[in-house]
Image (spheres, helix red, strand yellow):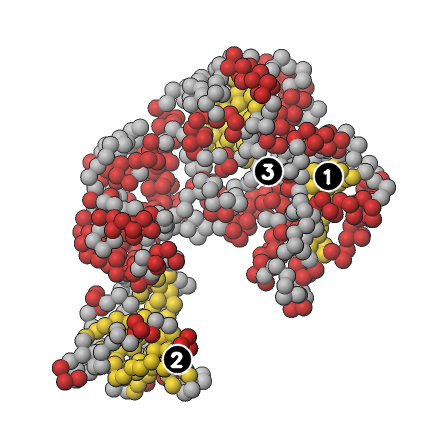
Amino acid sequence: MSVSTQVTTDPLSLPVQYIRGIGPKRSAALENVGVRTVFDLFFYVPRRYLDRSAIVTIAQLRRVLQPGGIFDPGTQEAPADVRRDYTVVGEVRSFRVMGMGRKSRFVLVLADQTGSMQCVWFGGVNFWKKAFRIGETLAVSGQPTAFAGVLQFVHPDLDRISPAAAGGGKPDPFTEPEEQEGAPAIDWARTLNTGGLVPLYPSGQELARFGLDSAGFRRTIGSVIRTHLDRVREVLPDSLLAAHGLVPLSDAIRSVHFPHSNAELQRALRRLKYHELFIFQLKLALKRRWVKQQTKGIPFNPKSALARKLVDSLPFQLTRAQVRVIREISGDMESPGPMNRLLQGDVGSGKTIVALVAMLIAVENGYQAVFLAPTEILAEQHYKTLTALLANLPVTIRLLVGAQRTRLRRDVLEDVRAGSARIVVGTHALFEKNVEFGKLGFVVIDEQHRFGVLQRASIRKKGENPDVLVMTATPIPRTLSLTLYGDLDVSIIDELPLHRKPIKTTLADETAKESVYKFVREQVEKGRQAYFVYPLIEESESLDLKAATSHVEYLQRQAFPELRLGLIHGRLPSDEKDRIMEAFVHKDLDILVATTVIEVGIDVPNASIMVIENAERFGLSQLHQLRGRVGRGSDQSYCILLTKKWIATGAGRASRRTSDPLSLDQDRLAEQRLATMASTTDGFKIAEVDLQLRGPGDFFGTRQSGIPQFKVADILTDTHLLDIARADAFGLVDRDPSLRQPEHRVLAEHLRSHFREELSLVQVG
């Protein structure tokens, strides 16, 4: 790669284990939250802040609790992530333990020149009664309450301002109110819990066990800032800092942890967000540059008689979007560099045909092609679809999955090794060491987010830099696409086949199911077929859900005794699933009762009704994928979402049984999901809502999906910064792909120090 991966001696890459006060045990706990080095610790930013910038007297604090009376010491409105607390500075007058046993509490009386108040702690009494001395001065912060008419803070944060003076006396902290606007002369740089905006850090039971609660992080990071911040070198070029008015990196680190004002905090956050997004986009730009210009690929001849024969044999015309995407892909295949392209297309948009055309170009050039699917049922479905499309073409296609008989598997492996298998469809089984290709030149990866980066690297190594086409039926919002697939060229099939009609989606509560059954019966009598989908295979004692295995009996005996029903779910053996699906495809079944095993891959044009029971239990993307199983023919199709009455109507929540497993918050989210489904069939609009509801980490249903977890930036709200950082990063790599210019020297060293492992995987698409 253009940026060497040699080790540097950046002092900020020092492991936190060697920082004074941390050691091996704390460093192990920190590693679990992604903190391994000093630099990582600097970027462990607070989750929110407490505004304790103004100090009040006890008399002023008492006014806060008066009816209609509020004392607001600040004039600047706090942002959403900043909570306004009150801070009092006073002298310890007395303290004692009240109550006995588990009900005991520690009560401390604090006083200033305007009055007195109590500070109360429940639990840890033996610790607190040894923690204070009469006469010492404390700064305590919290939200005021009143108990039996007594003003108090419960479990306040505190800082020691001065020890008890000789003779029990000390200067009053409010001796110069006019000069200091009512604030005492306190060196806030020496405090941790009061004064200014106080940071609250993400923590947890494991971290707190090692003294790394929020206050522990403040102490630790404060110490590291004092000892290491002067070693921070500016990473970004001066030209970028000036162009965007960004504060220096060291100032931003100090201010994000210990800001003096909200304005200073916002400047620091903007700098660190830009920094994080820029570095991420820079890695993508370097990766893309390397793959496109530094790696030798296969220059295919895009003219293919096989592909032309396939297209001419289709019973329909390709859409303009499909033709456009085929041209984009064939243009990439013709270039000498390896292709790395993402193909996005909604369910039913015709991605498989596009991928097959590209694979046939590779086959005609003497190479093998691989179609990689995330599950066996999807691999089997793709295999059958491709086999049918290739029926009149002299192209051998083989299937390789884990659950194959030994003899069949041996035959497939031999065909793959000899090169006689021109197209190979498979699952993770293709990654195994004993899978050898004769001449692999093209790889199609379906739903890339389900495969790890090392797995994708291993399949590429089985050929000589083969072209890679990544396909997804999950419409990806633009902001997420720029982070998850930002190093790939993107093609989008943004129209459905001409014969398709929009699916009519209806939301109904369970009281209407008899009319739903009547509608399904009428549609079947017209020659159509239907799906009934359930979230579980068997009944759950803890969840009031209908399960496929039990409800199919009800549907057969009570609802549709005259119709032919079948049941399919993931636990059935492969041959049984094949038998049932074949019966449904050949119209030997009228209704297919299923779990989400049919979410992807199943294509039955005659099936025009999708009934989803307990629809509130499904995710938005999952509902959209299920709906995509119908509407694949020329007839009008319908999707009926059956749900609880209070979900469907938005009313009656107050009368729900308290034992119902859905919380009110979950109800509201379910309402949003189902309302979105009923209002649009646009996959990209649905994906935007899904991303907003679930967040980027859970967008694909798993946090192991390769989606970057930014520490400071938020790709949902920082889209403007993301666009700027991407343009800057890709522009810089275009101008200086090796980062050898003097103003980029520190940036190159920063990448080598902190991202060696990622840079070593730069060739993985």
Q: Look at mark 2 in the image and give the residue it sits on.
A: 100
Q: Residue furthest right?
A: 562
Tell me which label, 1 or 3, sits earlier in the chain: 3
What is the distance, in whole Å, between disc 1 and disc 2 at their CAs?
Answer: 63 Å
Circle 3: element type: loop
Q: Nearer the viewer, mark 2 or mark 3?
A: 2
**554 in relation to 75, above or below:** above
Residue at 30 percent of width and 46 percent of height: 36
Q: Amino acid at mark 3?
A: Asp
Residue 596: image x %, image y %? 64, 42
Q: Nearer the viewer, mark 1 or mark 2?
A: 2
Return the residue nearer the eye: 361 or 579: 579
Q: Look at mark 1 in the image and give the residue it sits on.
A: 567
Q: Which label number is shown at residue 155?
A: none
What is the distance, in whole Å, between disc 2 and disc 3 at their CAs?
Answer: 66 Å
Q: Look at mark 3 in the image and give the residue it sits on.
A: 346
Residue at 64 percent of width and 15 percent of height: 393
